[in-house]
Amino acid sequence: MIGVKERTPVAERAGPEPATRLDAAPEPAVRVERLNAYYGSTHAVGDMTLELPSRSVTAIIGPSGCGKSTFLRCLNRMHEITPGTRVTGQVFLGNEDIYWQGVDPVEVRGRVGMVFQKPNPFPMMSVYDNVAAGPRLRGWGLSNTDMDALVERNLRRAALWDEVKDRLRRSGATLSGGQQQRLCIARALATDPAIVLMDEPCSALDPIATYRIEELISELASEVTIVVVTHNMQQASRVSARTAFMLAGEDGVGRLVEYGKTDELFTTPRDERTEAYITGRFG
Amino acid sequence: MNAALALQSGVGRNRVLRRRHVLEQTMVVLLGTATLLAGGLLALILGYVIVRGLPALDLAFFTERPRPFGVTGGGIAPALIGTLIIGLVAGVIAVPIGISAAIFVVEYRSGRWAEVVRFAAELMAGLPSIVVGVFVWAFLVRGVIGNYAGIAGSVALAVIMVPIVGRTAEEVLRLVPNSLREAALALGAPRWRVVLNVVLPTARAGLATAIVLAIARAAGETAPLLLTALGNVFFSADLFKPMAALPLQIYQYAVAPYDDWHTKAWGASLVLVAVIAAVSLLLRLAIRRGTAS
């Protein structure tokens, strides 16, 4: 399903460049080069080029249908599991292009974790087994004591340990929505990914649960690189260091409009479309 | 004047309401009758089988083998054992094939191939069981094995079970939310692990239902067994020799001209129904226990 690599020389790049005003990010965790994503013949994401800095939070905002979730799913090769989809371009983790021919998507997803819009703990697994699922599914073969330590460590990282330590054997489905989402974060952290992608992680949660997740995102930013897609501009401004604004053009193709430091993008947007969006004039 | 108008419209509204009420009552009665008919038919069959079959049941009925033609007494023990063996072997053959096919169609849906498999399963489910019997007779009884054999009966029943297991399992696997597959894939799990550790455990209860349905359907089949397992009045656990089975025993008892044998046919019918119910119940209980822990 993956398009054959064609390394486009920089000089040949067409189209208007998005308004990007970042000094070269310090040790970028992810470097995206002219990424295009398709569903069948529908061109969903067009010519995304940007660098995501390491150990910080990058927010991706934009109206519904602008391709932000699709873009996110390209960063761990989840886009291609939908039949009929296609990706062209390059995504570098460090020096390695995850779309290069020999790269195993399964291995990529081990390094780039993901948290979904709706909390989706495995319903037939306990709280403990949910956190242990990643290492088990990937066949790490840990001893019981090592697994106990790993589960506790990651539940602590997800700020959930104190709430669930007495019911580790209960089903993950018995937790509240906010707890389930933090369980999913713990599950994603358990395979020790360098990057965690979050696709509107709070959109199914109440304000208090949302606040706790946002707090958690800010804390985790010191350890991992986080990319969070959100509908909520306040959320983007609260949790992220950088923000990318995407918008679908008249051709329906989602493109990067503006990318920059979050406080600058929200206070002095350079593109009038960004300004129109963040002041609520469309979207 | 105003009061009269109000009264009139009130009456008119009442009439509309009353008509709706009558219609509602009529529908409830009609639907209730249909439900009663459907349920009643089942109760009638079960009740009749119990009433006619119970007198046949005694210890000898369960422990003895059938007597020679025309002799009073005897039981269904070889048939009971035969049905359990033939059914178990058929399940061991059919369940992995049916569930694997369902996994292929749902989890590895590779477009056209999935369609082909689904279409084949539909055709297979539509095959008259006697045709399956004739095929297995020609292929195994006359060909590979050379004589009537229990294993041939198992194969015939397995052919009948595969599409039932497969189609039911397919529905069940489709009910597993995609978000769970995505969650597992996003953890860096290879596809086969996702199926084995996430999809199948989630669908466990439904898969048990698929197996139960198939067993219930196949256990009562008579025509294919006539042509394959043949039946046997002696105890035999040899899969490569003719083997007794409950439906065959029911048939033999039922077509004989003796009242005692007719009663035994009813008794054997009751036992067959009970065996199917018991296997279904046990399987469900086992699955529930597995889910609780």
Image: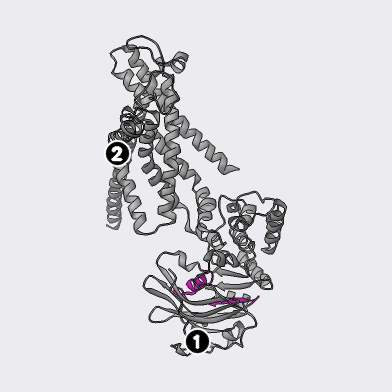
Q: Can you tell which of label 2 and label 1 is closer to the viewer?
A: 1
Name the kind of residue labelled 2 in the image: Leu
Residue A162 location, quadrant:
bottom right
| In this view, A213 is above or below A272 | above
The chain carrying label 2 is B
Magenta range is A54-76
Front-most of residues A129 and B137: B137
Q: Please name the residue that numbered disc 2 is placed on.
A: B30
Which picture quadrant has residue B30?
top left
Q: Which chain carries label 1?
A: A
The local crowd at label 1, few if under 14, some if 14 to 19, many if 20 or more residues have their Cα within 10 Å, is: some
Point out residue B92 in the picture as x, y percentages from the top left corner. Answer: 45, 38
- Which residue is tagged 1? A18
Residue placed most toward the observer, B247 or B11: B247
Between the C-alphas of marks 2 and 1, the distance is 68 Å
Q: What element carries label 1?
A: loop
Give the image location of residue A19, x and y in percent: 52, 88
Residue A255 appears left or right of A162: left
Helix, strand or loop at disc 2? helix
Q: Is B3 above or below relative to B250? A: below
